[in-house]
Amino acid sequence: MCANGATPQTRQTAAPATENTNRRQPFPRGFLDTIATGWADRPDQSPPVRPQAPYAATRRDAVSAAFPGRRLVIPAGSLAQRSNDTDYPFRAHSAFAHLTGWGSDAVPDSVLVFDPTASGHDVTLYLRERADRTTAEFYADASIGEFWIGPRPSLAGVAEELAVATAHLDGFEPADDDLVVDRDAALTQFVSELRLCKDEYEIAQLRLAVEITVRGFDDIVADLPRIIATPRGERAVEGVFHWRARTEGNREGYDTIAASGPHACYLHWTRNDGAVVPGDLLLVDAGVEVDSLYTADVTRTLPVSGTFTPVQRTVYETVREAADAAFAAARPGVTFRSVHEAAMAVIAARVAEWGLLPVTAQEALDPDRGGQHRRYMVHGTSHHLGIDVHDCAQARREMYYDGILRPGMVFTIEPGLYFQIDDLTVPEEYRGIGVRIEDDILMTADGPVNLSAAIPRTADEVEAWIARR
Ligand code: GLY
Ligand code: MN
Ligand code: MN
């Protein structure tokens, strides 16, 4: 007997054990006799070709040229189970999105295949054709049936929109000598490095992602009184940003970090279950991902009361000085690494001045014996940004960290200082202060452009922003 008094449900018809869920009811004969009929014709859609299609074609040409004679397979990936019969929202593999131009509406289980020919490759996008209304898939499959999830695109429609040949997924046959992204190191590295320099479509999408993110940060500042009044105010911050991300973009490009007070010292604090308390700093690291899957990645640190205390201001302005030094060091032709080094020189100098280091700043900056200052900023200053928040992660070191900054690269500058609440190496008034300032930078032939400059950055600007809203 169940706790609620009901007897355990007995199935009315025999069915495979895997279908034995209490939510599935058998379909009676009358339903089965009528469900396939009585539907209006679906008009043939002829969607326009999407603006990203020619860019994706150019990227596919580069992949084809790099792997002559090899069959290449780039799967979109599949739905991932969250629990029982609920899944996480589907998110196509970044290489798949980059090479197809298919973003938030990509169909799970699709596969992009490069079949070698005498002169290059024939490229085919395999996807699951929409199911006819006479099929059980249409009405009974809760994960892909159109009765459940809404209309799916047709093979012909996808071929037109993305300007690529399409075929039914059932026709895709894997072969032993396929090079499969994420399984073959050379292919995985190539498609990651292919994203290091963004084309004009990608730059426009990143600008859009940042624009919406700017509004999301403004929403948070405008809502500070309600956030402070909410017991789990950090969740309120997350929710306010989520509203903007979902209404104007696809979603967030990563879990929002909403960290008040000492939580700001936990670099990826996403539990977000604390209060937002006047007198504390609130660190918000959030970015909107747009439908093409390009994402912003921005951090601002706000005095919850509207005004920095003197020690908070000192720490904040030091982080800003480090960010400005990194920005000044960034130009075409220098190494990616040198941007980080410029920020770290400021961090080391200031924490040495404050008496926090057992060595001099110069000794701390020694590549072998130094690093004492890194206790207060363990993360890097920059990462590439694009379809992934940490984009191009499989690129070789000589192309990434030791690589040269080129026009078209988009990366973050995000120094920080984090004084843990129980760090006995810092004076008491510093403990529990965490500050990060993160901007999204586009490198051009003329130098760096701060795409997120519209969000107030200096301590004075931040105070004025809170006062205004
Ligand atoms: N939001 C993660 C990062 O800044 O890298
Ligand atoms: Mn970042
Ligand atoms: Mn970030």
Image: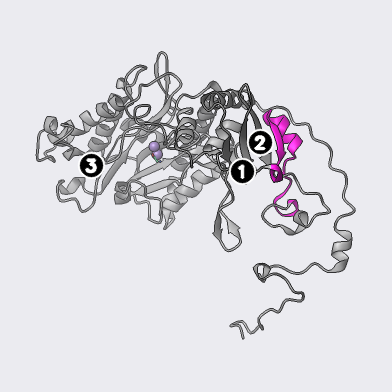
Q: Is residue 114 above or below residue 231?
A: above
* Residue picked out by circle 3: 376
| Mark 2 surroundings within 10 Å by alpha-carbon count, few (fewer than 14), some (14 through 19), many (20 or more) | many
Q: Is residue 280 above or below residue 404?
A: below
Q: Nearer the viewer, mark 1 or mark 2?
A: 1
* Residue picked out by circle 2: 125
Task: Pinpoint residue 181: horizontal percent, then vertical percent.
Answer: 51, 39
Q: Residue at x 84, y 54 (%)?
A: 134
SS type, badge 3: helix
Residue 203 colored in magenta in the image: no
Identity of the amino acid at label 3? Tyr
Count of numbered badges drawn on the protein: 3
Measured in 3D between alpha carbons, the distance from the residue under mark 2 to the one under mark 3, in whole angstroms, is 48 Å
Q: Which residues are magenta?
A: 146-171
| Mark 3 surroundings within 10 Å by alpha-carbon count, few (fewer than 14), some (14 through 19), many (20 or more) | many
Task: Pinpoint residue 432: horizontal percent, then vertical percent.
Answer: 25, 49
Identity of the amino acid at label 1? Pro
Sequence-wise first label, 2 or 3: 2
* Residue picked out by circle 1: 174
